[in-house]
Amino acid sequence: MIKNTSYKVQSDVNTEAERLYYQIEEGAYVTTSAGVWTVYNGEWVKIYPQSGVGSGLGWTRYDDTVYTSENKLTVTSGTEVVLPNNGATVYRSYSGIDYYNSNTQKVLGSAVNDLYLATIVFKASTTNAEQGYFHIVLENTEGTLYERLHEEFDFPKGNNVTHDIHAVFQYYVDADFIANGSQWKIAATNRDVQVWDIIFFFSKIQSYA
């Protein structure tokens, strides 16, 4: 006669410091306050939770209050400047996460190969729509170049008409990005451009930490 038998196995809940102290052994499972981990291909991999608090995944929104319809930022033709955001109002999926530093105006990354989405929103206008256009770009201060995250905009609706700008970029972060940070910049061509009501929205959608 064959009987089905169930067994209950309960592991201790360790600290993150204890997990990192353990010798790497393929197939090992460890439970900590941050989640459940296993060793796969010689590295710790979090298998639960994959989202929410403790996973490192989430979103943050930063609203600028300096440049408004009453106080527009003027980007002079032929120049490139950092797209500012003082982060006076911040919304988070949960407390304790930040993907942007309003003091240094730099975009942040947590760990190598983390994957992010960035949404850049603002209003813009120009005095000469026929000749004026601008671009926004993510640029590292040094190291790896991120200029591939770049988009150009023109003004099809006429002079001094307000345009609602909404751009979405997907990117991963490498060691240079984490060490140096990066900045969103804006450049105007042929005509000055005015910008206001700036919002940054960042989502970490995949984590290797």
Image: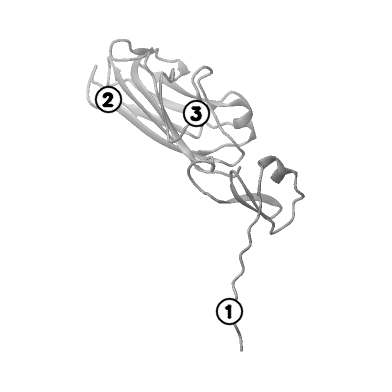
Q: Is residue 151 above or below residue 63?
A: below
Query: Which residue in the protein does label 1 denote?
Result: 4
The tag earlier along the polypeptide, 2 or 1, is 1
Q: Residue at x 58, y 35 (%)?
A: 110
- Where disc 3 sits, the SS reads strand
User: Secondary structure under badge 2?
Assistant: strand
Q: Which residue is mark 2?
A: 163
Percent x, y of residue 160: 24, 16
* Scheme of image coloration: one colour
Name which quarter of the figure residue 199 lies in: top left
**How many numbered discs, if any?**
3
Say left or right for 28 vs 204.
right
Residue for badge 3? 138
**Nearer the camera: disc 2 or disc 1:** 1
The x and y percentages for residue 101 are 51, 22
Q: Pointers 3 and 2 in contact (CB under 8 A)?
A: no
Q: Amino acid at mark 3?
A: Leu
Can the viewer see residue 117 in this picture? no
Q: Amino acid at mark 2?
A: His
Residue 164 position (above or below residue 193): below
Marks 3 and 1 close (CB-CB < 8 Å): no
Q: Badge 1, how many Cα within 10 Å: few under 14, some, many 20+? A: few
Q: CA distance from mark 3 to mark 1?
A: 59 Å
Q: First in sequence: mark 3 or mark 2?
A: 3
